[in-house]
Image (cartoon, rainbow, N blue to C red):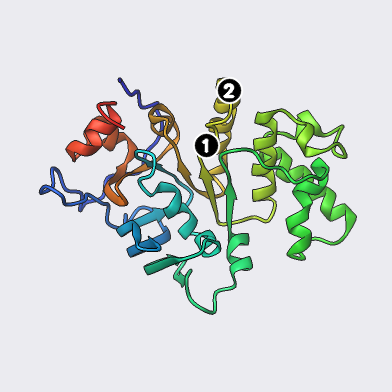
């Protein structure tokens, strides 16, 4: 499989980047002096009961960039994503060790307000899941819950801005009171993105956001992601290698619960440092 990396600006290489590692040693980036850190993860391990799903995860995620998580099904990508907003807390018998920091704050600290955390870390799921409410109420629901807006004029302004930022306003501005579920699949996913950004999070997590969409809707979401990274840090899970090459500034390759390689996307796809990453990217397995 030939992977084409679209012409786009990419972050400079870290001065600490290694070439071919020793066998079994993951390749990761150190903090890049040209980009500010958004999320810092150190020695992260997670178990579902007795089964270990994440093993010694170390990664720095940079502000206002798109980071793609790639790897075979069941390798820990979505589990890692849920560590960033503590959604794994909702799963019985989960045990976690290690550090997840966001802007210097320990995400897993006992004093961390989980509701406030999930305001800062929005999430868009694989299958569009609008609330059983109007388009308008889908967008304004969370800002109301967090007491971000109260006056009707402010709510109207917020809804329009979020829908514009999600590239949906022109398509729905005359039917805001219709159910969100009445929209097409691609429109529903953009509504979910509008809902996520309405509370102005710092980070947006996307778990295979286009896997259930047609190619045209997929292209629309990808273009939208490229615009949204001007405002937000985006971390996305994808099984589509061409998509990772098109949209991501950085890419992390997961395998059996470990990060095998993490680099700027152009370098990883053009010259992967590990044989496992090369085999996966080129379609030899996965």
Near-viewer residue (235 or 153): 235
Q: Secondary structure at mark 2?
A: loop
In the image, taking residue 165 as reference, residue 95 lies left or right, namely left
Q: Residue furthest left?
A: 22
User: What residue do we see at 19% from left, 40% from top?
Assistant: 273
Q: Residue furthest front?
A: 50
Of label 2 and label 1, which has the lower sequence position?
2
Near-viewer residue (13 or 115): 115
Question: In this figure, which residue is indicated by the disc labeled 1?
Answer: 226
Q: Is residue 10 visible?
A: yes
User: What residue do we see at 46% from left, 59% from top?
Assistant: 83
Q: Give coordinates of residue 86: x percent, y percent.
A: 52, 63
Q: Residues within 10 Å of mark 1 (few under 14, many from 20)?
A: some
Q: Quadrant of the N terminus?
A: top left
Near-viewer residue (201 or 110): 110
Q: Residue furthest bottom?
A: 111
Q: Give coordinates of residue 166: x percent, y percent.
A: 66, 38
Mark 2 and mark 1 residues within 8 Å of each other at the beta carbon: no
Quarter-of-image position of residue 228: top right
Q: Is residue 148 visible?
A: no
Q: Secondary structure at mark 1?
A: helix
Tag shown at residue 150: none
Question: In this figure, which residue is indicated by the disc labeled 2?
Answer: 214
Question: Which callout, 2 or 1, points to the residue nearer the camera?
Answer: 2
The alpha-carbon separation of the residues under discs 2 and 1 comes to: 19 Å
Q: Quadrant of the C terminus?
A: top left
Q: Residues within 10 Å of mark 2 (few under 14, many from 20)?
A: few
Q: Give coordinates of residue 277: x percent, y percent.
A: 25, 37
Q: Is residue 260 above or below residue 221?
A: below
Q: Tally the marks.
A: 2
Q: Give coordinates of residue 11: x percent, y percent.
A: 35, 43
In the image, taking residue 12 as reference, residue 156 lies left or right, namely right
């Amino acid at each position: 499989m030939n992977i084409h990396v679209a012409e786009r600006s990419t972050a400079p290489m870290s001065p600490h980047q290694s070439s071919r590692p020793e066998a079994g040693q993951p390749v990761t980036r150190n903090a890049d002096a040209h980009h500010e850190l958004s999320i810092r993860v150190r020695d992260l391990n997670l178990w579902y009961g007795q089964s270990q799903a994440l093993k010694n995860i170390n990664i720095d995620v940079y502000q206002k960039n798109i980071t793609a998580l790639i790897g075979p099904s069941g390798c820990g990508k979505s589990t890692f994503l849920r560590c960033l907003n503590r959604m794994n807390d909702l799963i019985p018998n989960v045990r976690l060790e290690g550090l997840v920091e966001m802007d210097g704050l320990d995400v897993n600290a006992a004093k961390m307000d989980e509701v406030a955390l999930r305001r800062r870390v929005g999430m868009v799921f694989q299958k569009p899941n609008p609330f059983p409410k109007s388009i308008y109420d889908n967008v304004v629901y969370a800002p109301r819950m967090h007491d971000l807006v109260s006056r009707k004029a402010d709510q109207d302004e917020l809804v329009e801005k979020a829908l514009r930022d999600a590239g949906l306003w022109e398509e729905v501005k005359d039917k805001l009171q219709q159910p969100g579920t009445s929209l097409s699949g691609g429109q529903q996913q953009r509504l979910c993105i509008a809902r996520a950004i309405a509370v102005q999070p710092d980070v947006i997590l996307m778990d295979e956001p286009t896997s259930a969409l047609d190619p045209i809707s997929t292209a629309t979401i990808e273009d939208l992601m490229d615009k949204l990274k001007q405002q937000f840090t985006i971390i996305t899970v994808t099984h589509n290698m061409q998509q990772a090459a098109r949209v991501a500034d950085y890419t992390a390759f997961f395998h059996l619960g470990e990060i095998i390689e993490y680099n700027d996307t152009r370098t990883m796809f053009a010259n992967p440092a590990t044989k496992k990453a090369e085999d996966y990217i080129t379609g030899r397995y996965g």
